[in-house]
Image: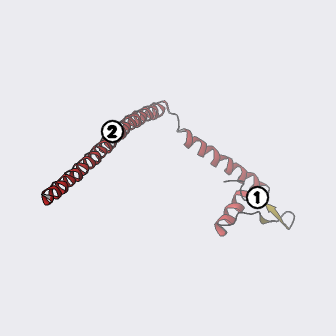
C-alpha cells in the first residue's frame, strides 16, 4: 500500500514536471514566434525602404540625365566643369602676370614644394629672386 502511494506520488510529480516543461516550451515557442514575426516585419520594412530609395534614385537619375541633355542641347556647360575651367583660367592668368614681371608664379612654387614634400603642412620658405631672400609662403593658397 505504501509502495502504491509512493508510486502514485512519483507519477504525479513526473506529470507536474512534464506539464511545467510543456508550458515552458510553449512560452519559449511563442517568444520565438513573436521574435521571428518582428524580424519578418522589419525585413519587409527594410525591403520597402530599399524599393522606395531605388525608385527615388532612379527618378533623380532620369531628372539629371534630362537636365544634362537639355543643357547640351542649349550649349551650356556642366557647372562643375565651368568652375574648373574658370579656376584654370585664373591660375593661367596669374602665372602669365608673374611671368611678365619676370617672377615665378606662386602656383608653380607651391606645386613644386608639394611634389617634393607631400606631408609638409607648415609654412615653407620660398626663395624670392627679387629680394634675394627666403620668405614664408602659405602652402594652402591653392588647395
Front in this rendered view, residue 45 or 115: 45
What x and y, as percent, mark residue 80?
56, 42
Which secondary structure, mark 2? helix
Looking at the rendering, which quadrant does residue 140 occupy?
bottom right
2 or 1: tag closer to the N-terminus: 2
Residue at label 2?
41
Looking at the rendering, which quadrant does residue 46 occupy?
top left
As drawn, the label of residue 109 is: none
Question: What residue is rendered at 19% in x and 57% in y?
Answer: 10
Quadrant in the picture for the N terminus = bottom left
What x and y, as percent, mark residue 135?
83, 64
Vertical position of residue 90 compared to residue 60: above or below: below
**Within 10 Å of the Cα at label 1, are there few (<14), some (14-19), or many (20+) other Cα atoms?**
some
Mark 2 in CB contact with mark 1 (< 8 angstroms): no
What x and y, as percent, mark residue 48?
35, 36
Residue at label 1?
138
Question: What residue is rendered at 74% in x and 63% in y?
Answer: 122
Quadrant in the picture for the C terminus = bottom right
Which secondary structure, mark 1? loop
Vertical position of residue 85 compared to residue 114: above or below: above
Amino acid at each position: 500500500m505504501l509502495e502504491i502511494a509512493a508510486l502514485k506520488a512519483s507519477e504525479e510529480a513526473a506529470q507536474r514536471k512534464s506539464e511545467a516543461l510543456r508550458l515552458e516550451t510553449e512560452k519559449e515557442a511563442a517568444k520565438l514566434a513573436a521574435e521571428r514575426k518582428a524580424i519578418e516585419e522589419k525585413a519587409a520594412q527594410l525591403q520597402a525602404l530599399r524599393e522606395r530609395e531605388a525608385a527615388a534614385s532612379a527618378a533623380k537619375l532620369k531628372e539629371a540625365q534630362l537636365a544634362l541633355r537639355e543643357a547640351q542641347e542649349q550649349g551650356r556647360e556642366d557647372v562643375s566643369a565651368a568652375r574648373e575651367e574658370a579656376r584654370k583660367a585664373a591660375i593661367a592668368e596669374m602665372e602669365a602676370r608673374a611671368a611678365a614681371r619676370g617672377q615665378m608664379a606662386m602656383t608653380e612654387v607651391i606645386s613644386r614644394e608639394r611634389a617634393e614634400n607631400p606631408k609638409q603642412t607648415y609654412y615653407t620658405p620660398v626663395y624670392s629672386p627679387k629680394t634675394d631672400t627666403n620668405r614664408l609662403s602659405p602652402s594652402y593658397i591653392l588647395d
